[in-house]
């Protein structure tokens, strides 16, 4: 991953006057979705690229060490060998970007990946995922324990009530503390955009998260009723662009929740390319949170 975002001082003047133009964002989202994303002959190559951005995820109440082991195997061998050979890509060491699990399953994932002889990062959700409604002390301890167990990326959830009540300073302070608790691990901040009330709040929360030192901002937990949508993504990507222009820091973006088809994945890649450019199309700056997407990509490659 890229170097850590050290964050900036809290500057509320950046966000105090922000008003997102809702109809314009919706128009832009419709444009992107209406377009055929990738020419047929390039499709397999783009789908393989998409695989390398996936945070392969299992976040279920019935997760066990054996299904985490299977997940790790799939992360190391995401596409069948015969399909890779047919595309002459079998020697390119294509893996997913990371595996993502609950804190209690980090040890299982670290063990399984070590046994498989690969250095795919383990990401852990934390801070009272998915609701974030636990005591701050508990949330910080959860980060520290996950890092201790070997997680090198932490996907934290914010306390949505701070956004809904406009407590930007408190939100900044909490995320600063998350950043500190992560130590050397990368901080990915989940905004749970489906619960933030407005696109203007999405922009403001994105900005605060980046000022506070997030290495990535992420749309959703995947557990909300509304997850990764294009309008929300456009607002978050514009915030990332604005932050880059103001500070020179590149912050990563991760849509998650409801991204299930190869077609969806290609549309997301296309959106990143158009909004932020090719330099963001690498695992250090772009991830897709998904649990079932891989099998559809494999199916699509098979029929191409």
Image (tube, helix red, strand yellow):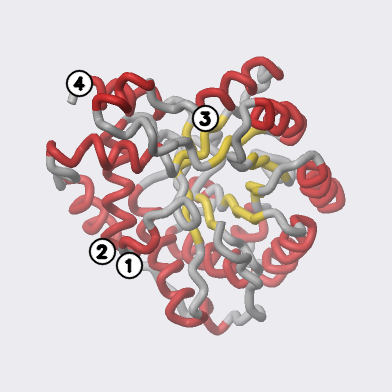
**Label 1 – label 3 distance at C-alpha:** 42 Å
Going 77% across and 42% down the picture, which residue do you hit?
A: 146
Element marked by disc 2: helix
Query: Which residue is the site of mark 4?
Result: 303
Tell me the crowding category of disc 4: few under 14, some 14 to 19, or many 20 or more residues within 10 angstroms, Cα based: few
Query: Which residue is the site of mark 3?
Result: 76
Tell me the crowding category of disc 1: few under 14, some 14 to 19, or many 20 or more residues within 10 angstroms, Cα based: few
Look at discs 1 and 4 and give the one toward the viewer. Answer: 4
**Label 3 – label 2 distance at C-alpha:** 41 Å
Look at discs 3 and 2 and give the one toward the viewer. Answer: 3
Mark 2 or 4, nearer chain start: 2
Mark 4 or 3, nearer chain start: 3
* CB atoms of marks 2 and 1 within 8 Å: yes
Query: Which residue is the site of mark 2?
Result: 24
Tell me the crowding category of disc 3: few under 14, some 14 to 19, or many 20 or more residues within 10 angstroms, Cα based: many
- Figure disc tally: 4
Query: Which residue is the site of mark 1?
Result: 21
* CB atoms of marks 3 and 2 within 8 Å: no
């Amino acid at each position: 991953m890229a170097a850590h975002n050290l964050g900036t001082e809290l500057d509320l003047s950046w966000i105090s006057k922000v008003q997102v133009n809702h109809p314009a964002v919706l128009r832009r989202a419709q444009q992107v979705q209406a377009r055929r994303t990738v020419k047929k002959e390039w499709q397999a190559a783009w789908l393989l690229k998409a695989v390398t951005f996936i945070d392969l995820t299992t976040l279920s109440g019935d997760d066990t060490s054996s299904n985490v082991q299977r997940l790790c195997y799939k992360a190391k061998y995401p596409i069948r060998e015969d399909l890779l050979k047919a595309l002459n890509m079998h020697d390119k060491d294509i893996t997913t970007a990371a595996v993502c699990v609950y804190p209690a399953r980090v040890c299982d994932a670290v063990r399984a990946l070590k046994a498989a002889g690969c250095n795919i990062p383990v990401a852990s959700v934390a801070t009272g995922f998915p609701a974030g409604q636990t005591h701050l002390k508990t949330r910080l301890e959860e980060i520290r324990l996950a890092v201790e167990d070997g997680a090198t990326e932490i996907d934290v959830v914010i306390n949505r009530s701070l956004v809904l009540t406009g407590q930007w300073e408190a939100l900044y302070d909490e995320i600063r503390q998350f950043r500190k608790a992560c130590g050397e691990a990368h901080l990915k901040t989940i905004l749970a955009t489906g619960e933030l009330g407005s696109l203007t709040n999405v922009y403001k929360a994105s900005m605060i998260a980046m000022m506070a030192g997030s290495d990535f901002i992420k749309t959703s937990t995947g557990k909300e009723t509304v997850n990764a949508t294009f309008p929300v993504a456009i607002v978050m990507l514009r915030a990332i662009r604005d932050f880059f222009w103001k500070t020179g820091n590149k912050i990563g973006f991760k849509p998650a929740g409801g991204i299930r088809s190869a077609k969806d994945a290609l549309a997301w890649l296309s959106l990143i390319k158009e909004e932020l450019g090719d330099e963001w199309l690498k695992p250090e700056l772009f991830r897709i949170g998904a649990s079932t997407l891989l099998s559809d990509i494999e199916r699509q490659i098979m029929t191409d």
